[in-house]
Amino acid sequence: ADTKQTMGFQAEVKQLLQLMIHSLYSNKEIFLRELISNASDAADKLRFEAINNDALYGNDTELKIKVSFNKEAKTITISDNGIGMSRDEAIAHLGTIAKSGTKEFFGKLSGDQQADAALIGQFGVGFYSGFIVADKITVETRRAGAGAADGVRWESTGEGDFSVEQIDKPNRGTDIILHLRDGEEELLSSWKLKSIIRKYSDHISLPIVMNKEEWDAEKKETVVKDELETVNQASALWARSKSDITPEQYEEFYKHVSHDFSAPLTYTHNRVEGRSEYTQLLYIPAKAPFDLWDRNKRGGIKLYVKRVFIMDDAEQLMPTYLRFVKGVIDSADLPLNVSREILQESRDVKAIREGSTKRVLGMLEELANAEEQDKKDKYAAFWKEFGQVLKEGVGEDAANKDRLAKLLRFASTHGDTEEQNVALADYVARMKEGQDKIYYVTAESFKAAKNSPHLEIFRKKGVEVLLLTDRVDEWMLSFLTEFDGKELVSVAKGGLDLGKLEDEAEKKEHEETETSYKELVEKMKGALADKAKDVRVTFRLTDSPACLVADEHELSGNLLRMLKAAGQ
Ligand code: ADP
Ligand code: MG
C-alpha cells in the first residue's frame, strides 16, 4: 500500500509562491476565481473524455462546483465533480510549472514589488494563488474512472515541499481545502463569498452552488441549511445575448479563458449564421505573452461544439499570425468526436477560420481608423505589442493582404522617432509632387536606419523614407511590393531612379559630372576588380564620400547579414 510521501517543489514554484503571496495581497480575492476556473476546466475535461467513454460519469452526471466554509475550522472548500487527478497528475500539476516562457518570466522579475505584481499577473497565478489567503492547502482528489480507494491527498504549507498519500474518496473530482491564515476570517461569510463569486465567476457555465443560510429567530443567529442554491447565472456566457452581458462579465470571462490577469484590449462577440453556424467570442490581449515567439506555442482558441468543450489551442481556427487572439468558438455543425486531424480537413473549420480572421481584422480596423483618442491609443498599444506578428500576415494571408497593408505602422523620416506610427496611407498623402514611389530603408537598428547614407538625398529633397528595423520586415517586403498603386522601393538598391523628383537642370549637370569623373571611375574599377561588381558616380550622397549599394536584383545588405547570422 501507499504511504505518505514528501516531495520538494520545483525551484520556480517556491520562488513564485513567495513573490505572489506578497505582491498580490491587495488582490487576494482572485484566489477564488482561480480555483473556480480550475474546477470549471476540470468539468470541461471530463465532458470531453466522456464523449468516447460515457461510463466516466458513473451515477454522478450533474456537473457542478460547490463552495463551502467552516467557521470553527477556519476553512474554505471548493469542490468539483470534474476529471480529478491521479497521484502522478497531482505531483506534476501541483508541484511544477509546465508553462512555456517560464524561464523568461523569472528572468524579468526585478525585485520591485509593483512591477513584479504586474508581471506575475500576466504570467498567470492559478492554483498557487490559494496560498495568498491560506497557510495550508489540502487537495483531495480522485481521477474519473479510478476506484474509491485510489483517491489522493496532496497537502502543503506553500513553503518548500508538499506531501501526497493515498486515501479513500467516495466521489470523483477534487476538493480544495484552504486553511485560512490568521486575519482572513472575514472570508468565512456566505455573503462575502457570494459577492466574490458574482464579481469574478458569474460567467462560469456550470452552476456554482452554496448552502443556503437563514435567520433563525429563536436562536437569534443565521443557520446554514442543507439546501443548496446556485450563486451564478450558470449559462455559457458566449451563448447569452450581448445585451445581457456587462463589460465586467466580458472581462472576467477573458481572464478565465486566457489565464491572463489583466483586462483585454478589446473583443468581438457574434453569432454567425448561414452555410456554417457558430458563435465566436474573440479577445485581443493588452500585452503580448512571454511565449509569443515560441515556435511550439499553440493558439489561444477554445473550441466548443454545442456548448461541449472539445479542445484548447485549436490552432486550425486562427491563422498563425493571429496566434495572440484568445477566446471561444462554439460550432453548431462539427461532430462532437472531432479530432485535430478532422479539424485540419474540415470545410466548416475553414469557413470558421476565414470568418474569424475577418472579424479580428475588422476589430483592428475599427481601432486603427477611429477618431476617438482612446481607440487610437489602443491601436498604438496593440501595434507595439503585436505589430511584428501581424506583419507575418502579409506573407501568410494573401487573401487579406490589402487589409493588412492598411493596418501596418512604420517609423519614418517624417517623425524621425523610433515609434512606429506611420500608416502607408499617411505616407502617400505626404508624397511630394512628382513622387510616384514609396521609399524605405532597412537596417538592423533604428539608429543605423536613421543615419543611413542612402537617406541623404531624400532628406535634402524633403522626401519621406520609411525606416524599417524589425527582423520580419525584409521578408514581409518580398510580399508587399506596392501599396495604392505605388511601388515600394528600397533606397539602397542600385540605379535609384528618382523619376520626376529630379529636374532637367539636375540631370544635365549629373551627366556632365559623370563624364568628368570617367577616368577616376575606371581606375577604381580596376583597383576593386575582385571586390566590387561596379563603380559609379552617385548623386545620392550629400555628406558621405561613398556608399555600398546592392544590385537591383540582389539580396539587400541587411538580408545578407540576417542570412549569415542564421548560418546560411
Ligand atoms: P492552469 O489552470 O493555468 O493550467 P493552475 O495553476 O490553475 O494552472 O492549475 C494547474 C493544473 O492543476 C491544471 O492545469 C490542472 O491540470 C490541475 N488542476 C488544478 N485544479 C484542478 C481541479 N480542480 N481538477 C483537476 N485538475 C486540477
Ligand atoms: Mg487555472
Image (cartoon, helix red, strand yellow):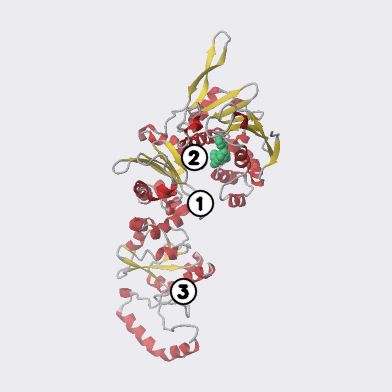
Q: Secondary structure at mark 1?
A: loop
Query: Where, by quadrant of the figure, is residue 90 drawn?
Result: top right
Q: Looking at the image, which residue is at 54% across and 9% down? A: 217
Left or right of 345 on screen, residue 532: right
- Where is residue 26? Give x, y as percent: 58, 36
Tell which circle, 3 or 1, labels the residue nearer the N-terminal end: 1
Residue 467 visible? The answer is no
Whether tag 3 and tag 1 are in contact, CB under 8 A, the answer is no
Residue 120 visible? The answer is yes
Q: Secondary structure at mark 2?
A: helix
Q: Which mark is residue 159?
A: none
Q: Secondary structure at mark 3?
A: helix
- In the image, what residue type sits under mark 1? Lys
Q: Which residue is mark 2?
A: 255
Say few, some or many: other residues with alpha carbon within 10 Å of mark 3 (under 14 / 14 to 19 / 20 or more).
many
Say few, some or many: other residues with alpha carbon within 10 Å of mark 1 (under 14 / 14 to 19 / 20 or more).
some
Disc 2 to disc 1, how far (Cα)? Answer: 19 Å
Residue 494 versus residue 315 in the image, above or below: below
- Where is residue 536? Give x, y as percent: 42, 83
In the foreground, 485 or 433: 485
Tell which circle, 2 or 1, labels the residue nearer the N-terminal end: 2
Q: Which residue is mark 1?
A: 297
- In the image, what residue type sits under mark 2? Lys
- In the image, what residue type sits under mark 3? Pro
Left or right of 32 on screen, residue 456: left
Mark 2 vs mark 3, foreground winner is 2
Residue 45 versus residue 67 in the image, above or below: below
Mark 2 vs mark 1, foreground winner is 1
Disc 3 to disc 1, how far (Cα)? Answer: 40 Å
